[in-house]
Amino acid sequence: MLRYCMTFSLGVALLVLSASAAERPNIVLIMCDDMGFSDIGCYGGEVQTPNLDRLASEGMRFTQFYNNAKCTTTRASLVTGLYPRRSKGGLLRRNMLTLGEALGKAGYRTALSGKWHLGRGATTHPHKRGFQEFYGLLDGCCNFFNPVQPDPPYKGARVRAFGQNDERIESFPADYYTTDAFTDHAIASMRTFAGEGKPFLLHLCYTAPHYPLHAKPEDIAKYVGKYREGWDVLRKERYERQKKMGLLDPEQCRLSGKDSRAYSWKEADHDFEDLRMAVYAAMIDSMDQNIGRLLRALGDLGIADNTVVMFLSDNGGCSEEPGGRNPSKRTPGPGRDYVAVGPAWGWAQNAPFRRYKSWVHEGGISTPFIVRWPGVVKPGAINRDVAHIIDIMPTFLDMAGASYPEVHNGQQVLPVEGRSFLPLLAGKTRPGHERLFWEWSGNRAIREADWKLVWDKTVKAWELYDLSVDRTEVNDLAARHPERVTRLSAAWFSWARDTGLRVRTPATRKKERGL
């Protein structure tokens, strides 16, 4: 496995930036939860997202930015610059450095608002791992109107962990909504930090639009009735918009075919399906409204011009259906039931790609990624280079003029594995990754240049795609290139061992390597 050191020192980094950006910037990193590649307006969606669309028009959109297909592993890689490590030690260990710790050492003030999902112990709590201010959810999901309300009986009663810094919060006002509250804390932290005159890192992690599908009635009302033509029509409409805006090349990105887990629209309960997608859209709409509040606060504080704002999703749209698909027993929107969108809508949300959250085809790992940095990023730019969430740590260190230490708190730390994409933001080039790797719950992938090898746990076979002409993974070339399958699968297994993944028996490995 390759391990990368910092690729650009501060001196080199400043050479690629304009003189106006020489002052260390504030950094706002916004991540939403379980949102599809094509949901927001500037990526082809019909959901009203004027504030994210504004960020895109004033900044840069990436078309090949990758996450890890799952909430936990994405968060682990994003805050450490490392591929996930799997063992009893958990995803966040003492020998790993977090973004909060790294930028804190560089003199930044740091805050995390929203979902953490990487632990709540003495060595894994965000307030113990470099985020000087924390407010939000320590678990993976919660009721949006009352975060500590136990899950409904069909899922099993469970109280979620929610808190501020070291204090647990167990009661909430009647008008509470997590998306609003996370933004409130983020804006308050920015105001405090700006008053201190120090640069800051704000990591704002919305739980929207992760299930349960909970939204405000006035936001839901905007979208009821807009999804009655179904998921097949939705995918085609989004794809056509993506082509018109020049986001995707139709010669490289044909619309992928019907997903194996998507059910027939003709057999669906149209009222229920329209409602749950309307609530999902309303959750994104509400998030965009709150991002607008945050952008206005940056302007009011007079710090917008020296603040980098980034936006991404932790994985593709979600195909889960907690409790089963039964509209007579569950209702999206009111704040009690745990309803999700299911595989048919989840597949459509990632148009034009295949699959969704937990799968490592492009639909599961491709995220919209927007970067606005006045004076550095060219407004309206579209970047088609390949980048990954492990690149965020070295990029932020370059922005801060900081180095990655070998030792932290007396502990030898793992070397960062990402590569700074700071040159890309300035319209330059950078050395790319030799290979990128993914795994979640039996799904596997490796990308080398434009070749991608994928193992789908439901198909149980390696698939090979040339992404330079087939980004949507329509034409499987594994049978035509058995030697490439063998070589890339061997590289994947080597990476898996290095990162602590359980590797199957020799006989199974031989079959999976195509031997």
Image (cartoon, rainbow, N blue to C red):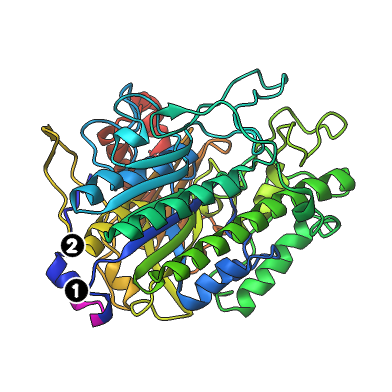
Query: Which residue is pictured at 49% across the width and 64% down the height?
Result: 297
Does 25 sit left or right of 253 as displayed? left
Q: Which residue is mark 1?
A: 14
Q: Quadrant of residue 500?
A: top left
What range of the chain is rendered magenta?
A: 14-19
Does 52 sit left or right of 65 as displayed? right
Please say if the residues under marks 2 and 1 sit with CB atoms less than 8 Å apart: yes
Q: Position of residue 21 (x, y in %)?
A: 27, 75
User: 184 or 406: which is nearer to us?
Assistant: 184
Q: Position of residue 35 (x, y in %)?
A: 59, 51
Q: Amino acid at mark 1?
A: Leu
Query: Which residue is pictured at 17% across the width and 38% down the height?
Result: 413
Q: Secondary structure at mark 2?
A: loop
In the rendered view, would you say 390 is above or below 305? above
Q: Which residue is mark 2?
A: 401
Query: Which residue is pictured at 37% across the width and 40% down the height?
Result: 76
Task: Mark yes or no: residue 468 visible.
Answer: no
Does 476 sit left or right of 308 as displayed? right
Q: Badge 1: how crowded within 10 Å, few (<14), some, or many (20+)? A: some
Image quarter of the N terminus: top left
Furthest-front residue in this view: 195
Q: Secondary structure at mark 1?
A: helix
Task: Mark yes or no: residue 135 visible.
Answer: yes
